[in-house]
Image: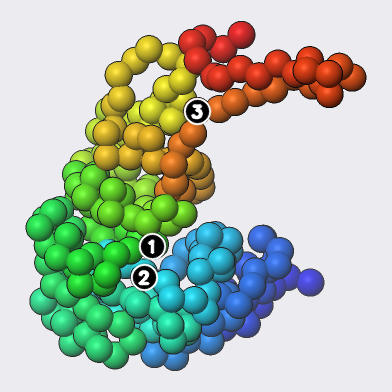
Amino acid sequence: MPPAAVGLRAGIIADIEAKFGATGDLVSIFAQHKGEGVDKWHHYLPLYERYFAPWRNRPLRFLEIGVFGGGSLELWRKFFGPEAVIYGIDIDPTCARFDGQHAQVRIGSQDDPDFLNRVVDEMGGVDVVLDDGSHVMAHIRASLETLFPRLSDGGTYIIEDLHTAYWRAYGGNMRAANFYATVRAMIDDMHRWYHEADVQHPATAGKVTGIHVHDSMVVLDKGTAHRPVRSFVNAATDAGGAQTTLAEGKAS
């Protein structure tokens, strides 16, 4: 039986469940939302659930770039719970009207390092960043370069709506200006043990432990990237026969 018409509350839930299976609480929170408007691609919601669920009902420090209509801040408050410190930033001064409702809102540009650092200082640090801001390539990179070093170890950094990486109006194209080229540079940096090239993205080098690429979304895991170690074990291991090597040089 086909799902109900997409756009109806039940239809939203049915569409997501049909395509992505079990979805968690966030889909229902979104579909039943009756506050300020929230606009989300359906496939984002199970991804949010996957990456954000471990942070629920704990003293999380969450920063959303892009407030827009204010509804997403209410969504995050319902999902993360009362202990979360939630901030939203936007360049549009009219977004200040949402300050103090479900989160704190600060007005400024996502490509202003001084502004971003002041906000993180006020938050007492940051554990999760969701970049749903201008979607302009230069702005995405500027925010990442400032905020990723401030992200706590074990933190999560998500950049969404990256279909704009292909749109010239946002500084994207199919070549070097595309943000996915930056992602490729971060992948190369993450594998620096196996090649002799210089670090290409110092703001993230040595602190990215995982890179997840989904349709229009990139998720970065923050942590200490340890040099890989491999061991060979067999029947003689207990007699001192184990061989352990560090990753370096070209892969064998």
Residue found at x 44% / y 46%: 223
Query: What SS does tag 1 mark?
Result: strand
Q: Amino acid at mark 2?
A: Arg
Image spot of residue 232 (x, y percent): 74, 19
Within-10-Å neighbours for mark 3: few <14, some 14–19, many 20+? some
Q: Is residue 138 visible?
A: yes
The residue singled out by tag 1 in the image is 127
Q: Earlier in the sequence, mark 1 or mark 2?
A: 2
Q: Is residue 169 visible?
A: no
Residue 83 found in image quarter: bottom left
Q: Is residue 39 left or right of residue 179?
A: right
The residue singled out by tag 2 in the image is 61
Query: What SS does tag 2 mark?
Result: strand
Q: Amino acid at mark 3?
A: Arg
Q: Is residue 119 above or below residue 227?
A: below
Q: CA distance from mark 1 to mark 3?
A: 24 Å
Q: Are marks 1 and 3 in contact (CB under 8 Å)?
A: no
* Front tag of 1 and 3: 3
Q: Nearer the viewer, residue 122 or 17?
A: 122
Q: Are marks 1 and 2 in contact (CB under 8 Å)?
A: yes
- The type of colouring in the image is rainbow
Q: Earlier in the sequence, mark 1 or mark 3?
A: 1
Residue found at x 18% / y 87%: 97
Residue 3 found in image quarter: bottom right
Residue found at x 51% / y 9%: 250
Name the disc covering residue 227, or none.
Answer: 3
